Amino acid sequence: MIRSAVAEELERRMTLLGLTQKALARSAGVGDTYVRDILKGKSRNPGGEKLERIAAILGCTARDLLFPLNTTGAGARSRGARHETARNESEPPTPYAPTADQPEITQYLNPPGYVAVPFISLKAGMGGGGYVEDQLLGQPKFFEEEFVRGALRASPCDLRVIEVEGQSMEPMLQNGDMVLVDTRRTSIIEPGIFVLFDGDGVVCKWVERAHDASEPMVRIKSENTRFSPYCVPAEQVQIIGRVVWFARKL
């Protein structure tokens, strides 16, 4: 069976980033069958918003998937032919058009030893009507694979990067800091710093259970004592994950 060019390119980029079909679909906010159908050739001409979401996680554009630079001729190769004519492994992956001021390590989709982590392009501290992740995904950020899989014991799809906004967590976290959030760790039995939707906006705060309340409540506190703690009904809170790392501009 002849595979489409988009299926070939999608599989190539998934392999480079170490993403499974399920992990990619989850990160992009699409159904598992959407990715599977493309790879199996059932959806030969995908497009629209869903493909843009997939492309964002893979660090490229939908056009990069539909018209890969290394696809030639009438289009796709068969699986057998693909293995017979595999690319030279030293050939760099297709660039995702980085800006000129980015360091060399980000010039290619999958720098050796690095993995891409989904970036949420909403600052933690901003108000708004809710948290719908698939509408907020931006260009992924690259981290050392050893750090992600070793130190954090996570896979790239378990993590999210988000920027802190405001002064409420100073001096611990400052305006503009980038934090890594582990989406597997959403239990607040052990208090800690979490990124969450508090019913009004996405915030980065100290979070704990309010044990003295008559109904299930979540107590949300700032590091900066100028900001008062407050309680929110547990049913209104969406825990995105626990903060496990941060970076700061000097």
Image (spheres, rainbow, N blue to C red):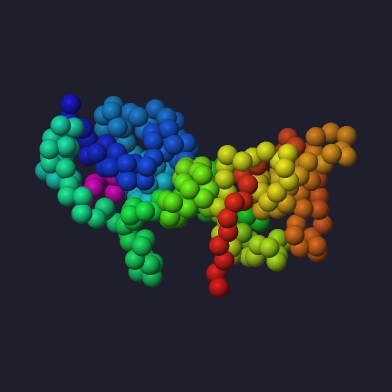
Q: Relative to 75, is 165 above or below?
A: below
Q: Relative to 2, is 137 above or below?
A: below
| Residue at left offset 44%, top offset 36% | 23
Q: Position of residue 160 (x, y in %)?
A: 53, 48
| Residue at left offset 14%, top offset 45% | 72
Q: Relative to residue 63, is residue 232 drawn left or right? A: right
**Magenta residues, start to end:** 64-70
| Residue at left offset 57%, top offset 42% | 183
User: In this figure, what is the number of numbered marks?
Assistant: 0
Q: Quadrant of residue 197?
A: top right
Farthest residue toward the bottom? Answer: 250
| Residue at left offset 76%, top offset 49% | 220
Is residue 118 in view? no
Camera-side residue of 38 and 172: 172
Q: Relative to residue 129, is residue 98 drawn left or right? A: left
**Could you tell me which quadrant the C terminus lies in?**
bottom right
Farthest residue toward the front? Answer: 150
Q: Relative to residue 152, is residue 143 drawn left or right? A: left
Q: Relative to residue 222, is residue 80 drawn left or right? A: left
Q: Position of residue 242 (x, y in %)?
A: 63, 47
Q: Quadrant of residue 112?
A: bottom left
Is residue 102 in view? yes
Q: Relative to 247, is 39 above or below?
A: above
**Quick check: is 187 in the magenta stretch?**
no
Camera-side residue of 61 and 249: 249
Q: Position of residue 199 (x, y in %)?
A: 71, 44
**Could you tell me which quadrant the N terminus lies in?**
top left
